């Protein structure tokens, strides 16, 4: 049965890709993604290099119970009750390098942004950016799925400081990269008309040159999803093309979150706004079960399914044979949503791989 609409949970770059695919639906065909729940994100990690890093410290992923980033420390909770901690600079060896040019901490183009920064322990910060998102959170509160409180002014200041710090730091990274290499395209301020001219006949080979080969690919899977010939593949490594692009096709290029993005989608004013534009901000915790940082994302997904607001939701499960290796899934099963609760600190082509596998 065809999916009419779905809710996506993703990092800022994945949310941007979903936005581009639907904004340019006259070309891409769009997607069923009707609600975008964006996560706060400072950086993302490579599964392979994270696994290697931990093995060098005699830790196997099968023995890890939970990962958390708290108080500027990367924490690894083990099944035997032990805790291993690492400084944030130590995570550089397994951080994905494309994160160095990302200016978005708080998922600025989502409907609802969620993260722990800005709220006390056990709560999540909610940034409501669209009327649709605000109405859903209102329903969650009224139906007893979440408890909502005003955001603490001091913690809000911390959120703005961290989000603004990421933008400032990575703007400097972009300038340094552009002084010695190719421009970082998504950071350019252009109109839709300019976008049309710049991306005409921009096929996968140009995508490879402008994004993939210089380390800016985010592994979101958008290029694979929109390819009309099914010749683009993305698994745990960079996208590859296995065939010839149709003449004039530019769908992979215009859908990528690291190529040209018009100001209609990504306003250049967002650079000066640490957490982007929004209608309301608050703190919340789930009243429907446990989860990381208040379990709010899980509560939202359960509410959407219970009230039949969406047909399916995107979740990140785990590979049964490779502990902590994230696997994208599309589901309407409450039990699967509950079992997937918690942050997976590794990149995965969440929405688009799941849609492609239908």
Image (spheres, helix red, strand yellow):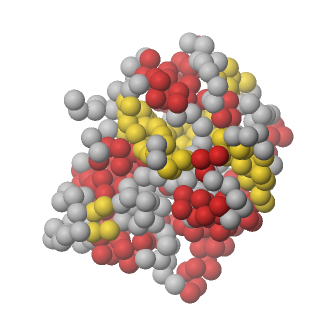
Report the front residue among 272 and 284. Answer: 284
Could one spot residue 65 in this view of the protein? yes
Q: Is residue 170 visible?
A: no
Looking at the rendered image, the quarter that the C terminus falls into is top left
Q: Quadrant of residue 125?
A: top right
Q: Judge by depth and name the residue closer to the eye, 282 or 68.
A: 68
Where is residue 21 drawn, in percent x and y?
Answer: 34, 51
Question: Which residue is outermost to the bottom?
Answer: 180
**Image spot of residue 58 (x, y percent):** 70, 59
- Is 159 rendered above or below residue 259? above
Vertical side of 73 occupied by 184: above or below = below
Q: Taking 193 as reference, is 292 above or below it?
A: above
**How far across and down, in percent of the image, does residue 18 sit?**
40, 48
- Quadrant in the rendering for residue 8: top left
Residue at x 73% of width, y 40% of height = 80
State the residue at coordinates (29%, 45%): 357
Q: In percent of the image, x 32 and y 38: which residue is there?
A: 32
Farthest top residue in view: 143
- The image quadrant where one finds the N terminus is top left
Q: Residue 106 appears at what percent x and percent y?
A: 61, 48
The image quadrant that residue 284 belongs to is top right
Residue, x 43% and y 37% (percent of image)?
A: 314
Q: Is residue 308 left or right of residue 287?
A: left
- Left/right placement of residue 246 relative to residue 348 reads left
Q: Residue furthest right?
A: 154
């Amino acid at each position: 049965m065809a999916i009419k609409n779905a809710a996506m949970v993703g990092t800022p770059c994945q949310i941007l890709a979903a936005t581009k695919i639907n904004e340019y639906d006259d070309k891409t065909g769009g997607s069923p993604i009707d609600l975008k729940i964006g996560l706060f994100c400072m950086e993302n990690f490579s599964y392979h290099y994270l696994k290697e890093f931990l093995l060098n410290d005699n830790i196997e992923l099968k023995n890890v119970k939970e990962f958390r980033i708290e108080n500027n420390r990367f924490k690894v909770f083990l099944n035997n009750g032990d805790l291993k901690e690492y400084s944030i600079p130590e995570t550089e060896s397994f951080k994905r390098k494309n994160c160095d040019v990302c200016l978005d901490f708080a998922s600025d183009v989502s409907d609802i942004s969620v993260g722990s920064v800005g709220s006390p322990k056990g709560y999540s910060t909610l940034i409501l950016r669209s009327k649709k998102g605000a109405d859903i959170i209102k329903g969650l509160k009224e139906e007893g799925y979440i408890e909502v409180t005003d955001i603490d002014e001091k913690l809000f200041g911390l959120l703005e400081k961290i989000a603004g710090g990421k933008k400032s730091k990575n703007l400097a990274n972009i300038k340094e990269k552009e002084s010695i290499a190719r421009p970082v395209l998504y950071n350019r301020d252009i109109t839709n008309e300019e976008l049309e001219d710049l991306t005409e006949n921009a096929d996968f080979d140009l995508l490879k040159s402008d994004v993939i080969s210089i380390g800016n690919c985010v592994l979101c899977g958008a290029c694979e999803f929109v390819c009309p010939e099914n010749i683009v593949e993305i698994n745990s490594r960079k996208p590859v093309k296995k065939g010839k692009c149709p003449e004039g096709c530019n769908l992979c290029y215009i859908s990528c979150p690291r190529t040209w993005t018009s100001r209609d989608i990504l306003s250049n004013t967002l650079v000066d706004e640490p957490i982007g534009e929004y209608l309301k901000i608050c703190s919340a915790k789930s009243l429907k079960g446990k989860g990381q940082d208040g379990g709010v994302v899980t509560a939202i997904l359960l509410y959407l399914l219970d009230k039949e607001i969406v047909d399916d939701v995107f979740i990140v499960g785990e590979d049964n044979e490779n502990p902590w290796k994230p696997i994208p899934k599309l589901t309407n099963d409450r039990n699967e949503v509950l079992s997937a609760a918690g942050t997976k600190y590794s990149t995965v082509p969440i929405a688009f791989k799941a849609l492609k596998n239908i």
